[in-house]
Amino acid sequence: MDITIKTNPYRCMKNNLSFEKEKRIRELRWVEQVSTLLDSKFKVGGFRFGLDPLLNFFPILGPITTFATSVLLVLVMFRNGVSSKAAVKMLLNTIFDAIIGSIPVLGNIFDFFFKANKRNVKILKEHYHDGKHEGSAKGILTVLFIVLLTLCIFLFYLLWLFGEWIIGIIAH
C-alpha cells in the first residue's frame, strides 16, 4: 500500500520565509549587541565607551581584533541584504577607524570618540527603515579610486623631488 502525504507547498514556503526572517532578525540583533559592546557598553560619568578603545592599548593584537570584528559585522549586515552602497560606507567607517586608531596615543583618544560600529548600525537602520543608502557603490568607489590615484601620483612626485634633492647633494 502506497501512502502519500499531501502537504501544501505554500505552507512550506511560508515556514521557510518565516525562518529566514527570524534568522535575519537574530543576526541583526547580534550585530547591534556586538556594536554596543565595542563602542558604548560602559559608562563613566556621562561618557560612554566600549572595548574598542580599551583593546587598542594592546599594540597590534588589539587593533587587529577590533578591526576584524568590525569587518565581520559589516559582512553579516551585507549578507542580510544591505545594499553595496551602504556596505561600502560601513567599510569606509571601519577602515577610517582602524587607520586613525592605530596611531599611538592620538588613536587611543580618537577611539573613545569615533564609534564606527555604532555609525554602521545607524547606516543599517537608515537603510532598512528610511530607504537611505540604496543602490550601487560605483559612485563612491569611483571617487575613492580617483582620490587614491591622485594621492599616489602626488606621493610619487614628492619622492621624485626628494630623489633629485639627494642626487643634487651627492653630486656637489
Image (tube, rainbow, N blue to C red):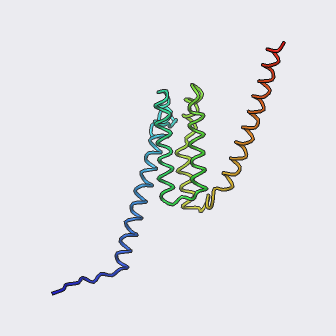
Q: Position of residue 143 (x, y in %)?
A: 71, 49
Residue 148: image quadrant is top right
Q: How many marks?
A: 0
Q: Is residue 11 above or below residue 74?
A: below
Residue occupying the far top of the picture: 172
Q: Is residue 133 left or right of residue 143?
A: left
**Furthest-bottom residue in this view:** 1
Residue 121 drawn above or below residue 100: below
Q: Is residue 126 above or below residue 164?
A: below
Quadrant in the picture for residue 155 = top right
User: Quick one: 120 or 45, which is closer to the camera?
Assistant: 120
Along the line of sight, the residue nearer the viewer: 5 or 169 = 169
Relative image position of residue 107 (x, y in whole percent):
58, 30
Residue drawn at 59 percent across, 55 percent down: 86
Q: Is residue 8 left or right of residue 145?
A: left
Q: Nearer the viewer, residue 44 or 111?
A: 111
Q: Residue furthest left?
A: 1
Instruction: From the top left corner, tell me how far across and down residue 89 is, in percent.
Output: 60, 50
Query: Could you tell me residue 168's position as x and y percent?
Result: 83, 18
The residue drawn where x is 57% and y is 29% is 109
Q: Residue furthest right?
A: 172
Quadrant of the drawing holding the N terminus = bottom left
Relative to residue 63, is residue 153 drawn left or right?
right
Judge from the rendering whether residue 130 lies leftward or rightward of residue 165; answer left or right.
left
Quadrant of the image for the C terminus?
top right
Name the residue at 80% across, 26% down: 161
